[in-house]
Image: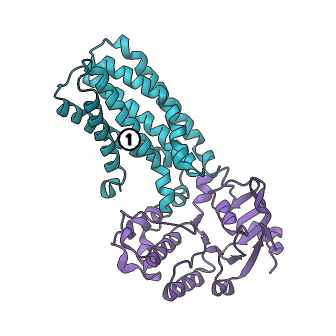
Chain colours: A purple, B cyan
Amino acid sequence: MLPEAFLAPPLVARSVLVTEGLTRAFGPRRALDGVSIGVPRGALVALIGPNGAGKSTLLRLAAGLDRPTSGRVLIAGIDPQQDGPAARSNLSFLAQDAGLYDALTVRENLAFVAQYFGRVAEITRVAETMGIASLLDERAGTLSRGERQRAVISRAFLGGELLLLDEPTTALDEDARARLLCALGSRRGKRTMLVATHDEEIAKRCDTTLHLAGGHLV
Amino acid sequence: MELRARETLVPVLLVGLLVVAVGLLAFHDVEQRVPIAAGVLWLALAFAAAVGMARAFGAEKDRGTLDVLLGLPVDRGHVYFGKVAAAFLLLLVVALVTAVTYVVVSGEGVSGNLLALAALLALGSLGLAATSVMLSLLATQARARDALLPVLLLPLLIPLLLAGTHGTEDVLSNAPFAQWRGELFLLIGYDVAFLAASWMLFDAAVGE
């Protein structure tokens, strides 16, 4: 499925994420250049490309954590620059270097986000999915790198409908990776997911793949 | 979270106590004690703001939680006010501990209009919190943020520190209200201006 197919009006109308001519320049360098995509509701989409292709930039712009140089983003039809809270209520972003509050327990870290999306009741189930249910009452500062990554992924699943995941398999062992793949697969159709990844297993399981290189879709 | 980790509370309290210690040692034989007391108090607050409060967002970025905070489905101005509230409370604790320590160690006793002193310290702490938290966000997006922060912060604090120290001197000297009301109004104006401007600009500052 070509990226341009996402831009057909019927598909844009039912897309949770739409970008139109999205450009982000850092001085003379264009990290993202005129990218237009639409991610349909319930789709699992992989975003792949070499280092410096603009994957993280695209996700950060979609999450409203950065401001485009030109173009715009629509989250469920809402421009984050016009109504940030409404747009953000529809999404959940997992950054590459996402962290936890070390002084809080894992449960408290998850609840910190879940409470804003009415998903507090799902904390235990999501933690079980990612294999950290036994760690919920431990302080986040005591977790290993891999356990922290499982926890931040769990936190992302407790956010809004649109999941923007930037390299979620970082620091995951085989068991955690398998759990993540299972979690993504089980949510297909119910959540909309855009995953920036180098992991071919994830890419293979996606509905479609978007290739970025040098800030452009290829 | 601060009560559990005490990441900021301990260093800023230590800074306050250090300022008291150095102030008392350096000026122990100066006859005019009121200016010394006022200077020590406000120096402790200024350093506490620069050392502790100005890391409000830098610490979040280092920890990897800044994106989580800014990604919440709330008006980002609420995030700013939340940080300011926390910084304000910490600075009040610094002010109280510093003042009590000064009184106890110097043996000078307590004089002056304490209610007015409390009002000046509260207003000053609020202004310090408002300014340092906002600059903390701006600094997270700069490259040399640890060097940039004091360069940006200290000039902006000059009106507040001038009003605070002069007002405190007058209050501790039992001066009439007419003598220190200018400083009081300046502090109120400073707080209103910086809180309002920061709240309006906060969302725009994210991602710049």
**Disc 1 packing (10 Å; few <14; some 14–19; many ≥20):** many
Q: Nearer the viewer, residue B186 or A205?
A: B186
Q: Which residue is found at the position 50% from the left and 40% from the top?
A: B150
Q: Nearer the viewer, residue A1 or B191?
A: B191
Chain of the residue under the numbered disc 1 shown in the image: B
The amino acid type of the residue labelled 1 equals Ala
Q: Is residue B139 above or below residue A8?
A: above
Q: Position of residue B131 (x, y in %)?
A: 49, 38
Count of numbered circles in the view: 1
Image quadrant for the N terminus of chain B?
Answer: bottom left
Q: Nearer the viewer, residue A27 or B29?
A: B29
Q: Which residue is found at the position 47% from the left and 31% from the top?
A: B191
Q: Is residue B39 above or below residue A93?
A: above
Q: Which residue is found at the position 58% from the left and 66% from the top?
A: A93
Q: Is residue B28 above or below residue A68?
A: above
What residue does disc 1 label?
Answer: B48
Q: Position of residue B104 (x, y in %)?
A: 17, 33
Inspect this view and state whether residue B89 appears. Answer: yes
